[in-house]
Amino acid sequence: MTGYTHSAVLTRTYIHIPGIAESIERELWLQGAEDWYTLLETPTRWRISEPYLSAVLQGAATSIEALEEEDHAYFAGRLPIKEHWRAYEEFRQNTAYLDIETDGGSQITVIGVYDGEETYQFILGENLDEFPEFIQEFSMLVTFNGLHFDVPMLYRNFPGLALDQLHMDLCPTLRRVGLRGGLKRIEQQLGLVRDPDLEGLSGREAVLLWQAYRLGHDSALETLLRYNREDIVNLKPLAGLAYKRLREKTTALRPVR
């Protein structure tokens, strides 16, 4: 975990506290409650009515404890899914950038995970069954369209799989900062470059590569794994960009002095 910094968004978040709407969160920011610590230092200062004030004070104290314990599940279970990005700074050192490949149907063929430094790939017929235990090590997932594709496919392929991580799906998250389209299109807009011989490959070609591998062409698997690796490695800078831009939007409200 990176620890608390003054630029963090999670520690100035209140909407994960039961009963606290975005309107109350914004009001607290405008009054100067820029984070949980400031809020608790002067508990009688805040001009919000009961029972909201008591809820916020208790929620802030509990949230500090959860953060100190690196309890990602506490925040994953309370933050709206579209706001999971707020926890990225605190949990990015234990984040899994994840992407799957399939046979064109319901069978996963490759799962790629990038931890920010190393790449791990799980392949059907080799080590795919090791994935469920491996993924439990992480506090946060970053995907592109994972809420609608990768995660449902994972649950289908691994009955009993439990994913309690925070999850930043970059497809809707980047849309909130004006970046639309598929992963490759967004990469091009931002100048992220792939290996020249992988340019133009898509999910459809990934299916064909797997089929070629099953027919005995080992080089097709090598290309598929390289393609998958490019997908997951590029998720990291995109996540950082999304966090930075959404943080700027979220912290634009300045407190009343």
Image: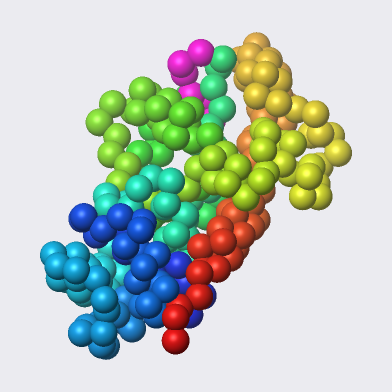
156 or 186: nearer the viewer: 186
Colour scheme of the picture: rainbow
Query: Can residue 240 be spotted in the picture?
Result: no
Q: Above or below — where is 65 with respect to 128? A: below
Residue 96 % position (x, y): 48, 50
108 or 139: nearer the viewer: 139
Where the C terminus falls, by quadrant? Answer: bottom left
Q: Quadrant of residue 9?
A: bottom left
Query: Which residue is rendered at x = 55% and y = 68% of the image?
Result: 252
Is 150 on the left-hand or right-hand side of 64? Answer: right
Query: Which residue is rendered at x = 55% and y = 17% of the image?
Result: 103
Residue 5 % position (x, y): 47, 79
Q: Above or below — where is 250 with respect to 238? A: below
Q: How many marks?
A: 0
Q: Does the magenta stretch include residue 109?
A: yes
Is 245 on the left-hand or right-hand side of 90? Answer: right
159 or 210: nearer the viewer: 159
Residue 70 % position (x, y): 31, 67
145 or 220: nearer the viewer: 145
Residue 45 % position (x, y): 26, 84
The stretch in magenta equals 105-113
Query: Which residue is rendered at x = 53% and y = 34% of the image?
Result: 145
